[in-house]
Amino acid sequence: MNAERRIVIIGGMACGPKTAARARRCDPHASISIVEQGTTVSEGSCGLPYYIGGQVASDRALLIRTPKYFKEVSDIDVLTGTRGTVIHRDAHELEVVNLATGVTSRLPYDKLVIATGATPVQPASLAGKDLNGVFTLTKIADANAIVKALGRETTKKAVVIGAGLIGIESAEAFKSRGLDVSLVEALPHALPALLDPDMSLQVEKELATKGVNLFLGQRVLGLEGDSEGAVRRVVTEHATIEADIVILALGYRPNVELARQAGLVIGSAGGLAVNEYMQTSDSDIYAGGDCVENTHRVTGAKILAPMGSTANKHGRIIGTNVTGGRDTFPGVLGTAIVKVFDLNVSRVGLSEDEARKAGFDPVTALAPGFDRASYYPGAQLITVKLVADSATGRVLGGQITGKGEVARRADVLVTTISLNGTVDDMANLDLAYSPPFNGAMDVLHHAANTVRNKRAGQARSVSAAEVNQRISAGEDFILLDVRSQQEWNDAHIEACQCRLLPLNKLREEVSSLPKDARIVTLCRTSIRAYQAQCMLEGEGFTDVRFMDGSIMAWPYAVVCGPVK
């Protein structure tokens, strides 16, 4: 036990307070100080969109801990309104300035922790970003300013720039407040950093259904205001959008300038470089949270992962290590989950595109199904996209969308990938089963088995996007719907290539299909479509594929009515 141990922490939002709390539990006699330039600490910033939208009634609910609490309960000194300005590494001192008085002083340390977080990206070249009514969303003060702006009768049209997590959540928050909402994204799809296009289409469909105006694949050229300096329009490459309030949700940039000036190593991804013990290039200085780089557990690459969950894990490890421990952090999987109106969306590990860029040869499966027994009241549809390595069967990642329960499936994927599990492992996981909670075979089991069938050469598929492209191009093929007449009447794909032939009649009517035809089979979830593929191949057909995910995962328009 070292009664003289002095621990100074820069940053009071997530990683910093967690570090302090853990350090106090490990060393009851250490001197622990948190330096925070804002007026509050331990804000629940992930809840800000829900406070704006009204689901969280008060900003006070997002204040997890106060400086008074830290002092009274844990004897931790919290210096709010104080900014760290210079790290004197040789002297082991942090120079700080009191922002109210301008007075500078030095805090001696044995161990220093940098938890300075990240700052919202605001391109310097973006004209109009300083107009009144233009906001970013990081802290409670930002949310309160937005709520105040929403209280004005003239605030009727909102534009959100950036369709990432914060952008999507902000769009829903504004819509729940009754505003006309437009969402602008420079890339072609929503949640572009999280989802492959086939899964993004499900998100875009939900946004459009809920009345959000989508401007995808459009770069913002600038913001225009009125004579009083208030924002009035967002100008993109292809449109001019009226706006009374604008949110810039263009991502975050790690706050590393203090560390850079101190000569600490900044990594290739732009964050502060740390080792598995969360030490910087100076062994007496640790760092965690949004300002550091993380190791991706699948690829080993250094990435930025600005998540409150990750920051808290960092904080616990740092708190252990600055008090003499040797805990390690293995890295992240880029896990994320978001609510998009009535749609739940999650991703884990690598997307198909990321897997290919990382040097893998990915094999995927799109598996729709229900989050519990289909006959049990309240069962909801979810769709799993599973990404695996075709050579080894190793699970690389997964994406899940649907109105049903997706978080538990995402957590199963996290565990499987973290343990280097394969699709064989996943197919045989002894998951909890009872009709109120699951089907006898979970959607994850079906996804894993589909990949196994593909790796064995038994199953061959095409994506919904490829089928849609073939239809649009007027290609000569048969889109064979093997569902029942009633299912077709409920919803079917309108295309001259589409033909209804229920699975129970396929054997007796197989002669009606040309043997040299290109055939794509579909059903509700792909199970019958795969069975139809096997049947047709058994009858000598050589060019048969099933549509991955079938009608339940079809993100394009469908029509209702009987066969014409």
Image (cartoon, rainbow, N blue to C red):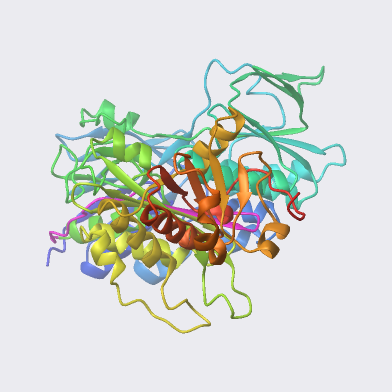
Residue 326: in magenta span: yes
Out of 346 and 444, give the one closest to the viewer.
444
Residue found at the far bottom of this picture = 434
Residue 504: % across, % down? 55, 67
Q: Is residue 446 left or right of residue 481?
A: left
Confirm whether the magenta stretch covers residue 32: no
State how many labels appear.
0
Span colored in magenta: 324-349
Q: Quadrant of residue 181?
A: top right
Q: Is residue 249 left or right of residue 26?
A: right
Instruction: Tell me: residue 223, above or below residue 454.
Output: above
Tell me: 420 left or right of 552.
left
Q: Quadrant of residue 367?
A: bottom left
Q: Residue furthest right?
A: 153
Residue 318 % position (x, y): 24, 55
Q: Is residue 141 visible?
A: no
Viewer-nearest residue: 286 or 121: 121
* Residue 5 visible to an observer of this rendering: yes
Q: Is residue 408 above or below residue 243?
A: below
Above or below — where is 136 with respect to 481? above
Image position, residue 343 (x, y; %): 60, 56
In percent of width and height, residue 255 lies at 38, 34
Q: Quadrant of the N terminus?
A: bottom left
